[in-house]
Image (cartoon, rainbow, N blue to C red):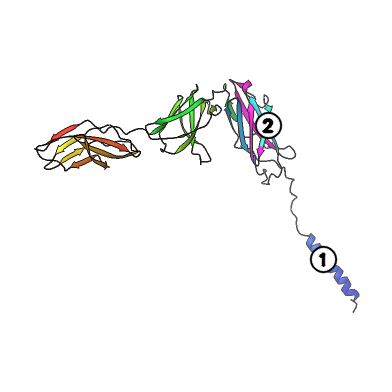
Amino acid sequence: MRASPLACVLGVIGLAGCGYLIGCGYPGDPLPPALNRPNRVLDLAALQRGTKIYLHFTLPAKTTEGLAVKDLPDIELRLGTMPDWEQNSTRIPASDVKVEKASVSAEIPVTQFYGKTVVVGVRVHGPEGRDVGWSNLELVVVVPALAVPEGLSAKDAPDAVALEWHATAPEFRIFRKNPEDKDWTLLGSSPKAAYLDTTVEFGKPYQYFVQSVEKTGNKYAESELSQEITFTATDRFAPATPIGLTVVPGTRTMELVWERNSEKDLAAYRIYRDGVKVAEGEASPSYSDKGVKPGTRYRYQVSAVDVAGNESKLSEPVEAVIP
């Protein structure tokens, strides 16, 4: 059945009305176009090592509007001198800037700045060249390159590994790791070309390298790294000779006491009577000798033994007799 002319008219009016009602919603003010300015770099770090300044920072992941930075932005990295560092600065060529994901680094030769303070800054530009200004600025007091430590060697020492090398510098840093470790650990520092590592475990291999350093302002200038060496500590040293041996006669025993040794690898004590070992494996610095007779004079000495079996010299002899 064909629709009546009135129904057709009402249908047209209804459609028009729907369109009108939909169009009546208030859309709000139009949003301004995004400026796409990457956020400011906040973690720029710089230090001198040898004849170069090494730089590192993280690229911002978002813009000031909170939008993701999709493409690699233009990185303006500059190095200059005081007082007006920006006017006296040079832009580091993009070919010298290394980018790995969000991590950015660069190595800048600075031999021409020996004796001067340089300033390093970076700003990151968006697609239209817009930016929000300079990062934190890094000041570096540039000094002549420090001597690289040479001839690093290691040898066994009592409860330690003794390291030595050749170089002249205000201070040295010593680094160590086990072969299975991924990262090196700063073991300590020394004002001279020698260091005693007292934290080793005997029979365990260790790797070492050292580095010259000099305090410059609130930073340290560093040398290039020495060669690495591997050394396995071996316990070749006996404990100290026990001291303070005292013998007190009892009714049917001789009671011995002495001062405790301080070695961390001490295993036990051995007791000698008239030059003959009468006991070993004693953990405490005392012993009760029950194999004695009244009226007989006895001569006692004590030694200390470590876990590797190294035995100390015998203590000073002490004589006693049971009345």
Q: Classify mark 1: helix, strand or loop.
A: helix
23 or 241, nearer to the observer: 241
Q: Residue at x 79, y 60 (%)?
A: 23
295 or 8, nearer to the observer: 295
Q: Residue at x 82, y 66 (%)?
A: 17
- Disc 2 marks which residue? 96
Q: Point out the image quarter for the N terminus.
A: bottom right
Which numbered disc, 1 or 2, marks the residue that appears first in the sequence? 1
Q: Is residue 187 left or right of residue 262?
A: right
- Disc 1 marks which residue? 17
Q: Residue at x 60, y 20 (%)?
A: 114
Give the spatial CA distance, label 1 vs label 2.
65 Å
Q: Classify mark 2: helix, strand or loop.
A: helix
Q: Position of residue 147 (x, y in %)?
A: 54, 23
Quarter of image, res 263 = top left
Q: Is residue 191 left or right of residue 73?
A: left
